[in-house]
Image: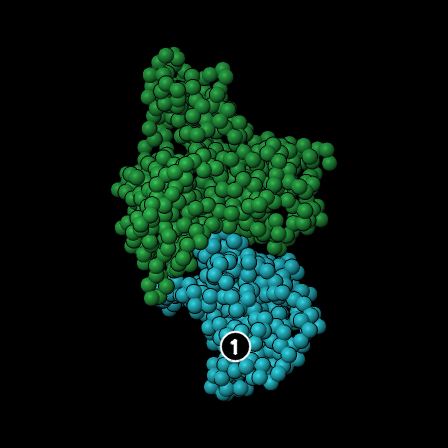
Chain colours: A green, B cyan
Amino acid sequence: MASNELEGLMLGQIEKKLRMKIPRQQMPAQDPKERIHNFKEVPNGFTPALAVKEAQRCLQCKKATCMDGCPVDVDIPGFLQLITEGRFSDAAKQIKLTNSLPAVCGRVCPQEEQCEITCVLAKKFTPVAIGHLERFVADWEREHNETEIPEIAPPTGKRIAVVGSGPAGLTVAGDLIKLGHAVTVFEALHKEGGVLVYGIPEFRLPKAIVKAEVDFLASMGVEFKSSYVIGRIKGIDELFEEGYDAVFIGTGAGLPNFMGVPGENLNGIYSANEYLTRSNLMRAFDFESHGTPVMAGNSVAVLGGGNTAMDSVRTGLRFGAEHARIIYRRSRKEMPAREEEIHHAEEEGIEFQFLTAPIRFLGDENGWVKQMECIKMELGEPDSSGRRRPVPIKDSNYMIDVDTVVIAIGNSSNPLIPRTTPGLETNKWGNIVADDETGLTSRKGVYAGGDIVTGGATVILAAGAGKKAARAIDDYLKNL
Amino acid sequence: MNEIVYKEDLYPNITLFRISTPELVNKAEAGQFIILRAYEDSERIPMSIGGLDREKGLLTIVVMEVGKSSAEIVRMEVGEKFLDVVGPLGIPTHMEDFGGTCIVIGGGVGIPPILPIAKALKDHGNKVIGIIGARTEDLLIYEAELGAVCDQLVITTDDGSKGIQGFVTHALQKLIDDGEPIKFVMSVGPVIMMKNIARTTEPHGIPTWVSLNPIMVDGTGMCGGCRVSIDGKSKFACVDGPDFDGHKVDFDELIQRQAMYKPQEKVAYDDFLHKCRIGLGKK
């Protein structure tokens, strides 16, 4: 460890009463005025001093309620304690015992709804910034080249095929390789990481970090096969014929939903998946060297209120839009996006039009979208999701001028694997039916987890599902 | 894998490649497509399959230079490897014994993909008539290959330099007028050609399928960029197609969508050609 970086740090635990007096430490971030012109990461991360101070706020509860909120069972008080001792890389290793992707999860997990909401301090004060600290130690370990390959069990001779290299698949691969199984991860795109590379923008999750996580798995012995579409070049049954003993399907929520309103196929109207894939995976923001174009509109409207909508609208802003707005049919309170993302978007000057829904798109003579007719909504009775249902207000129609529209209203399940795998049960939305606790599907030896099972959810829930499935696959293989 | 083993310029801006991709070739069927990426910073380009040699594991594609990405590809040489050849993608062309004559129609770089389709139709016991069209005789490709497979091959040129003067639709109309018992028409080529073919057969109720090649990114259903309106509903060409009932396709919308990036394509292409001229290009 670079000792000079630790010089002057006030290490060690402090008295409990004093801990509660320390305010939650704020993570430095790029100035909004600067960052809207670049794709660099927005928050800069804790300094060692900030990290130690923040970790010292942890009360080290005997019954750590924070852990109840973590889908991957990270020993939170344990790694926070290590931070207070200045043992940052050890803290990262502690997390990695149960979470293969700390640098990713530290950035994109909704901690405020998981570990931080259940932190004891949250009741009277503000919770410990567990996410920021997770990110800090993972970055520390990587940047100081202190990543070590963990102990790997002796080879079991069993082979597992993982389909999809998103958060679910990477977690399964990481957990099973440690247990001595041979793991091959198949990825349809040319880069591993799934939604972490094609979906989440550089300014929220630098791709170098995803690559480092993938490289780490590869260094443990995971074999990656990219540009390889399971369900096309090879079916699930053929994987078994080739000698794989079990298969995990983590193909994600792969089919973008559209609204079904007139004019939706006009030029300049994208699904969020396409808009973000062009920008992130295909590097459209660097058109000169990559040549993948995207419409860099002047007036961008993004439909939806989730994290993907925030990612899209902030991408539009960075492409140089004068007006980048969110159009959402409910109010701010109902938006599913993380508070942090909404806050960042607001800081950057994103305009929000709540209680508004498009009813048609109008194009120019060349088929380019130029206007969007919207209707105002009001909130009625709660619907099945528990949120109040938006109801159109009669005769409230009005027009918005737009040249780029991004539809970010969620995804349906990709049909490729269900269509080509006999006996694989799906529900009415086309999601693969899998056991909550084990991920086992209707097919023997075939497990599934992540968005392909749940529909669009979060990175950490996918990782959690991968974790459970890995455990179940290991049990299954032991008894094979 | 992905090595170019044969290259032939069919015409100054049309190049044929045979690529060694045994696993893909073994699995691919007529009517499917691939996505090709030449270099690390290249676009992902969907391409029709223009031939499958299962014994040698060779995939044939025919590329016309129309922009930066295709320009990069046609400058690659035997022995070089494409970075990615992904596939087979899409649903194969529907095959059965149609109990009558099948017509396969190709235009431009849409001609090569009809060869594997014609072969498969023959294998299913059909009588197959091929129609291929080009502006002028020199631009006709795959004449011998198709002639060897089809029961009959009809050629049209816009300038009358070979075969029937006019468009492929004229040849098709003539076959209909002559009372040929046509049970299935399959066409691959420029959108405007496929639109006119569908128009020609519609009054006669002849089942007519077209292979669509809209702008696409991932090719697995994820991006939705390739959506086309079929009977008023959006379908994804990559997972629901590429073949669709030509009588239900909104061709005008497709033509509009294909033009989406024309200005950027021109910028990228001009820049590429400029770099080639000053010696900074890929080749």
Residue type at mark 1 is Thr
Direction from residue A353 to residue A81 in the image, left or right: right
Q: Is residue A49 left or right of residue A208?
A: left
Q: Relative to B258, is A66 above or below?
A: above
- Image coordinates of residue A137 in percent, x first then y, are 44, 29
The residue positioned 46% from the left and 61% from the top of the image is B215
Q: Of helix, strand and loop, which one carries label 1?
A: helix
Q: Camera-side residue: A392 or B8?
A: A392
Query: In the image as oriented, which residue stretches furthest toward the right?
Result: A480
- Residue B3 sits in which quadrant? bottom right
The residue at the point 39 percent across, 55 percent down is A269
Relative depth, front residue between A341 and B140: A341
Residue positioned 49% across, 59% down in the render: B233
Please state, as top left, top right, bottom left or bottom right, where the C terminus of chain B lies in the image. Answer: bottom left
Q: Residues within 10 Å of mark 1 (few under 14, many from 20)?
A: some
Tell me, yes or no, if residue A221 can be seen here.
Answer: no
Left or right? Give the position of A440 relative to A286.
right
Q: Give the image location of residue A179, x and y in percent.
A: 63, 33
Query: Label 1 marks which chain's residue?
Result: B
Q: Quadrant of the N terminus of chain B?
A: bottom right
B99 with respect to A392 (left or right): right
The residue sitting at 51% across, 35% down in the picture is A461
The x, y position of residue A123, in whole percent, is 39, 20
Residue A265, horizontal then vertical, whole percent: 42, 59
Q: Quadrant of residue A131?
A: top left
Residue pointed to by mark 1: B200
Q: Nearer the viewer, residue B46 or A54?
A: B46
